[in-house]
Amino acid sequence: MSLTTSSLSERLLPERVVARARLGDREPLARLVIAGLAVLLVAVMLFSLTTGALQISLSAAVNGLFGQGEAASPSELRDRIVLMDVRLPRVLLGALIGAALAVSGAVMQGLFRNPLADPGIVGVSAGAGLGAASMIVLGTTALSPVVAVLGIYALPLAAFLGGLVTTFALYRIGTRGGMTSIATMLLAGIALAALAGAATGLLVFVADDQQLRDLNFWGLGSLAGANWEKILAAGPIIAVVLVGVPFLASGLNALVLGEAAAGHLGIRVQRLKRIAIVAVAAATGASVAVSGGIGFVGIVVPHLLRLTIGPDHRFLLPACALLGGSLLILADTVSRTIVAPAELPIGILTALAGAPFFLWILLRRKGLIAT
C-alpha cells in the first residue's frame, strides 16, 4: 500500500498540529517541517562527508572540520586533506546548487501560476548552458577581454545572461493581456531549448579537446569538479538570490489570485515579475555554470513540499532551499559511490527519478490516477 507524503506527516507529527493543518492552518506544520529539513540537511552533509572510496568516521570528520592544530598522524592528515579539499567543497556546492534549483522552480511556478514550470523543462537551463558554453569556447578568443576583466566570475555571469535572456523571452511569449498560457509557455520553452541546443552544438563543433572536456563536464551535470574557486565564483550569486527571494513571498502568494487581484492588494506586479525573472536567471545561470545541466530538482522538490505544507511561499521557499540542498547532496553521494571507482553523472540520477515524477504530476492533474 502506498503512503503519501501528507499521510506520513500525519503519523509522525503531533495530532494537534495535524488537526490545525486539516482545518487550513498549516503554519505550525510548516514550521515543524522546516525545522526537520534543517536537521536533515546537516545529517546528509555529515553522511556525504564520511562516505566514499575513503571511509572516514564521524568523529574524524568532525575533528577534521573543527579540530585545531596539526594532524597527529599521516592518516589524520590524509583524512583532513580529503575532507577540506575534496568533499567539503563538493558538499557545500551541492547544497547551494540544490537550493538554487529548487527555489528557482518554486519561484517560476508561483510566477506562472502552474506547478509544471521548471527552469530545466522550459528551456532556462539550456539558455544558461549556452551562455556557459560561449564563455568556455570563446573565452580565449573573442571573449578574452571579458575574461580578463571578470576573471572567475566570467563563466557564471555568462550563464546568468543566457538564462536571463531565455527567461525574459519565455515570459514575453507566454503572457498576453496579463494572462500566462501554460501551453504556450511549454511550447516556447521547447523551441528556445532547441535553439540554445543548436547554438551550443555549433560551439561544440569548433571547440578544441580541452574545451570539449569542459563542455562534457556540465553537459550531463556533475559536481566532480567542485573546488573552492567555483564556490567563490557561484556561491555569492546563489547566496544573494536565496537571501533575497523570501522577500517576494507575499507577492507570489498574491499572484495566485491573478495579476489584477494582486495589483488591487497593493502588489507592484510588474516590478515583482522583473525581480523574480532576474532571480531565477541568476540562480539557474550560476548553478549551470559550475555543475552543468541538473534537471527536475526544481519541479520535484516544490511539488513534494506543497503536498505537505501547502502553497504559502513564506514557508515553501525556505523549505525548498533545505530539501533541494539535501536531495542534491544525497544524489551526488550516490553518484560517486554506486559505480565506484567510476562516477555516474548526477544529471542522470535526477532525470531517472524526476522524469517519472513529472509524468505522475501530469497524470494526476488529468485525473487519470488517484491522488
Image (cartoon, helix red, strand yellow):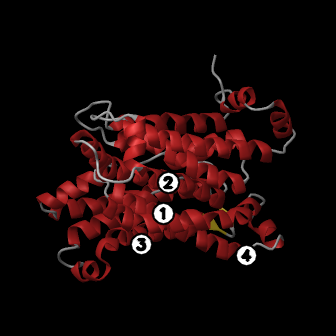
Q: Residue under circle 4?
A: 268
Q: Of callouts 3 and 2, which one flags the residue occurring earlier in the amino acid sequence?
A: 2
Judging from the image, what secondary structure is the residue with disc 1 in?
A: helix
Measure how far apart labels 4 and 2 are at the Cα level: 25 Å
Which mark lies nearer to you, 3 or 2? 2
Do the numbered discs 3 and 4 sit on residues whose CB atoms are within 8 Å? no
Local packing at callout 1 (Cα closer than 10 Å; few below 14, some 14-19, many 20+) is many
Amino acid identity at mark 2 = Leu
Q: Residue under circle 1?
A: 283
Between 225 and 350, the residue placed more toward the observer is 225
Judging from the image, what secondary structure is the residue with disc 3 in?
A: helix
Can residue 114 be seen? no
Measure how far apart labels 1 and 4 are at the Cα level: 22 Å
Q: Residue under circle 3?
A: 161
Q: What residue is at 40 percent from the left and 54 percent from the top?
A: 93
Q: Residue under circle 2?
A: 101
Q: Position of residue 59 (x, y in %)?
A: 42, 37
141 is higher (above) or lower (below) than 52: below
Q: What residue is at 54 percent from the left and 58 percent from the top?
A: 104
Local packing at callout 3 (Cα closer than 10 Å; few below 14, some 14-19, many 20+) is many
Q: Residue furthest left?
A: 209
Q: Position of residue 345 (x, y in %)?
A: 31, 42
Do the numbered discs 1 and 2 sit on residues whose CB atoms are within 8 Å? yes
Amino acid identity at mark 3 = Leu
Judging from the image, what secondary structure is the residue with disc 4 in?
A: loop
Q: Of callouts 3 and 4, which one flags the residue occurring earlier in the amino acid sequence?
A: 3
Q: Of callouts 3 and 1, which one flags the residue occurring earlier in the amino acid sequence?
A: 3
Which mark lies nearer to you, 4 or 2? 2
